[in-house]
Amino acid sequence: MSRFKFRPTVPRILALGYLGVILLGSFLLSLPISSKTGEWTPYINALFTSTSATCVTGLIAYDTFMHWTAFGQVVIILLIQVGGIGFMTVVTLFSFALGRRIGLYERVILAQSAGAMGRSGVVRLVKRIIIFTFSVELAGAFLLMIRFIPEFGAGRGIWFSVFHSISAFCNAGFDLMGAKGTAFASLTSYSGDALVNLTICALIVVGGMGYVVWSDIWDKKFRYRKYRLHTRIVLWATLILVFVPALLIYAFEHNGVLAGMGPGESFLACLFQSITPRTAGFNTVPLGELSDSTLFLMDILMLIGGNSGSTAGGIKVTTIVVVLFGLYSSVRGERDITIGKRSVDLSLVKQAMSLCAIYLILTMLAVLIICAIEPEENNATLSVVLFECCSAICTVGVTTGITPSLTVGSKIILILLMYAGRVGVLTLAGAMMTKRKASLTRRPHEKILIG
């Protein structure tokens, strides 16, 4: 029986922690007090919404404003906040409040949860995460109040500003714009509003950069040459992944959804749609009207995702960079993998390639199953389902509009994808596997033809 004994490893604690938050949230959202109809919400839809909020995704079965009461909206934003900064960070916050010391084992869990590069200084990093998060969200809320208070009134304007600021910083993509009368509209009514667009974009980018990066920038007093390699990769990759896709979206859509827009509105729309797939979930143009080329570009951006140790999902920018440099070195026949005059350990490259492979395999399997089980009347075409699955596993939340009409089976698959994407596929795999003793025997080598 000892071989079945539960051992609380770091991956298991993280996986079970998020699962516990999701289940608690789904119970609260299923209650009549959470629904504007005053009735019990079907549990599958409550579970779907709770998973989407905790995993900071943004895929929804109901319009957030039209279905959920103020209580339900508060539950959703709390789930987003916990999911965004990490449940272990929230646990640590309560420990600080109670005056309790953080033990060594908790520091190990915190280091992995917060994306820290080591255990030293992890408590200080968590304190910075908490202060930084609330400061940025508060600043974003004040900026949004300039627009929302005159439009919605003081009470609703303040609440909308706080809700959207937290949702944007945590890269969640939940919105309350159903208040304007159109369900599932996201921010399409603000496509030409520079204040709303630039504030939301800034919150998404700041949240998606990663706390480790901002901590490094602050510690090095904005001196670029002293930044860690990780920070330099993130900064360059972020610049490229913001402006290059924006130009491509304009090239693909200038005769499409952008046709009726002026130069300023087109610029804002392209910039917003290049930022939000990595991994925020808002949109300012109707995604169902985009061309297949733009949808596929957004699939790629979703899979790339944000940065490690951030509120964003996806494979992560640094992982993609490591894989690309690994492939480049392999093609050139070089033994060492060099990035920015620094060598990268081969085991890190293998881990990065494994991560990419697992993401692609899970996505393709999910697409295959959903295409097979969805009825024809749901219009679940290959490009639309691929878009939905990439959005789920990369915790993005953008959709062409098929989410509410999906069958229960498809929603369960998306729930599993969102959970795997937020916890981390390697963390989830580590939680399910047991350690085996290293074998002392070595098998004989044999060559296999590849390529």
Image (cartoon, rainbow, N blue to C red):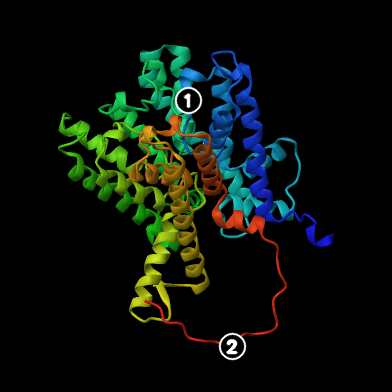
Please name whichever residue, 54 or 392, is drawn nearer the observer in this view of the structure: 392
Which residue is drawn at the image coordinates 37% and 66% (left, top)?
324
How dense is the environment of label 2, judged by Cα within 10 Å: few (below 14), some, or many (20 and up)? few
Badge 1 vs badge 2, beta-carbon distance below 8 Å: no
Secondary structure beneath disc 2?
loop
409 horizontally vs 254: left or right: right
Query: Is residue 341 at least partly visible in the picture?
Result: no
Q: Which residue is tagged 1? A: 62
Query: Is residue 35 at least partly visible in the picture?
Result: yes
Which residue is drawn at the image coordinates 43% and 61% (left, top)?
226
Image x and y of residue 10, in percent: 68, 55
Which residue is drawn at the image coordinates 50% and 41% (left, top)?
414
Residue at the outermost right position: 1
Q: Quadrant of residue 441?
A: bottom right
Image x and y of residue 22, in percent: 62, 36
Image mark for residue 272: none
Give the number of callouts. Answer: 2
- Precedes in sequence: disc 1 or disc 2: 1
155 horizontally vs 381: left or right: right
Secondary structure beneath disc 1?
loop
How dense is the environment of label 1, judged by Cα within 10 Å: few (below 14), some, or many (20 and up)? some
Please name whichever residue, 215 or 387, is drawn nearer the observer in this view of the structure: 387
Which amino acid, by three-letter code, is at mark 2? Pro
Relative height, residue 104 to residue 129 (above, below):
below
Image mark for residue 444: 2
